[in-house]
Image (cartoon, grey):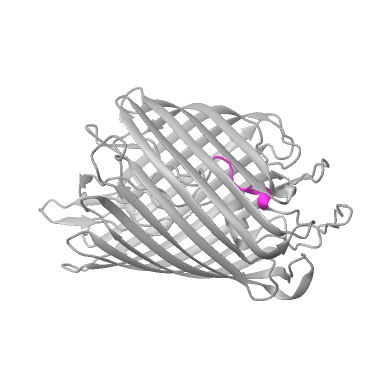
Amino acid sequence: MLLWQKMIPIRLWISLSGGMLFLLKPSFGERPKSFHSFHSNFGEIRIVEHTQEVAQVQLPLNEKSKEGSKTVAEMEIPIEQKIENKEIQTEKTDSDLSLSDEEIEDLLFGDLNDWETDEHEIQEVSNWMQFYLLELGIGHTDNPLYAAYTPQASGYAEITAESFFIHQSNPARKALLYFYGEGKKFTELDEQDSSGLLLALLDYTYQPDSSPLSFGQKLQHTYNNQGMDFSDLGTPYRTKITSNKSQAFSRMIWEDENQMKAVWEIGLGKSSLEEFADRSSEFSVGFTLGKKGNRWVDWEGQYFHKATDFKDRTAKDESGSKVDGKVKIQQSGASLTLQPKFEDQFSRGTKVKTAFTRARNGDGGYYDFNRWKISLSKELESDPWQSSFSLGYKSTDYLERLTDKNEKFQKNGWNLDLRISRLINSHWKTFVKWTGEEDRSNDPDYSYQSNFWSWGLSWEK
């Protein structure tokens, strides 16, 4: 999104999901789209030293915003609710959320895996490199609160600000500061008339001379505020959900001269909701193995395991009744990303990703689920036009959790992201974008459809 010097336009993207900082498309290239729609503009930067040697910055990033936080209908009202007559009791002293760790992640942060594109090269500099982005837009949405029963349309204004600073005075040491913020102001809503996300990240990488190994540390904090509609059988109930999430990661990266790369990562984190007592801590490990520079297709496989300990949430059985113990969820999953390397128009800028996640809770089976995801991402360029498109599908099966009809709870959904932009000059462009998603479930309380359409101007430097 940024202009390096005046004659070398570049575009940067930081992968929020754990591993690398990539230099991407030329300036004003469109952001790739993932399952959901919060997108940081960074990925992996390849820095060329003044000598002929090449040093690579391995700077990961992990949480992403959205066009409005997603899968909000997956969250049940954080109050007691009688299944027999759907009577809502409005005492908020019971802070228990009938919400899995997976649902909180989808709700406030979504799937944050960004699609990477080809690397480009820039010359190494000894002082701080600075990049800035500002976007202003207006739009319309048919369901900004992701209501299941009584959606309310609204116009809105939006603003996005993004900046990062990279320092590499020593070729073996790289430092990154990254800031992202976005907000929306809706015209037709009351107390839920705004939403926003703020993210701050500090990343440091060290690579010994002549070594294939590098080591990194990352600190990150994410704040998210989103209004939601939990209407139940036509009776509106709306609230704000505000989340704070802090994380720390350590990683080791190995890469050989043939672009085979392996990444080991370990992380700690804690989260909390402001409106209700719902605190959690997490421990995660991950492994990534990939190969670029192949003749036919580049590939990357990932595996992760995460243990989340909820401090305030009581475990539940399949019917939603409380049982002894707190919620302690073990999640594990794997994904495979493929990028064709053929030079035809269809293959260039195309990526396909499939992922599987398994979650289990030690006490009660209410939160146990299996989930599949698949997505397709595509970028097109025809100067001065650029566009990005992504389409995703997910299917979630709960192993024990029951609906009111004593059926095993199921959800499936799709999401679509489309963005088209036109370059105006070296700093300005105009864009239109559409984000749509739909969730369907055998429990109607968890079904919804939502679309955001907007137009705006973008400035970058």
Q: Verify whether residue 243 appears in magenta.
A: no
Q: Is residue 68 magenta?
A: yes
User: x%, y% of residue 173?
Assistant: 26, 61
Which quadrant of the view contains residue 59? bottom left
In the picture as drawn, the residue positioned furthest to the left comes out as 52
Query: In the figure, residue 265 lies in which quadrant?
Result: bottom left
Residue 63 horizontal/vertical position (percent): 49, 53
Residue 166 x/y as whole percent: 31, 51
> The magenta stretch spans which residues?
67-74
- Residue 197 percent across, percent down from the top left: 55, 46
Can you say whether 8 is above or below 43 in the image?
A: above
Tell which of 351 and 308 is nearer to you.
351
Q: Residue at x 45, y 32 (%)?
A: 419
Quadrant of image for the N terminus = top left
Characterize the magenta stretch by its predominant secondary structure.
loop
Image point (31%, 56%), residue name: 299
Q: Is residue 197 above or below residue 300?
A: above
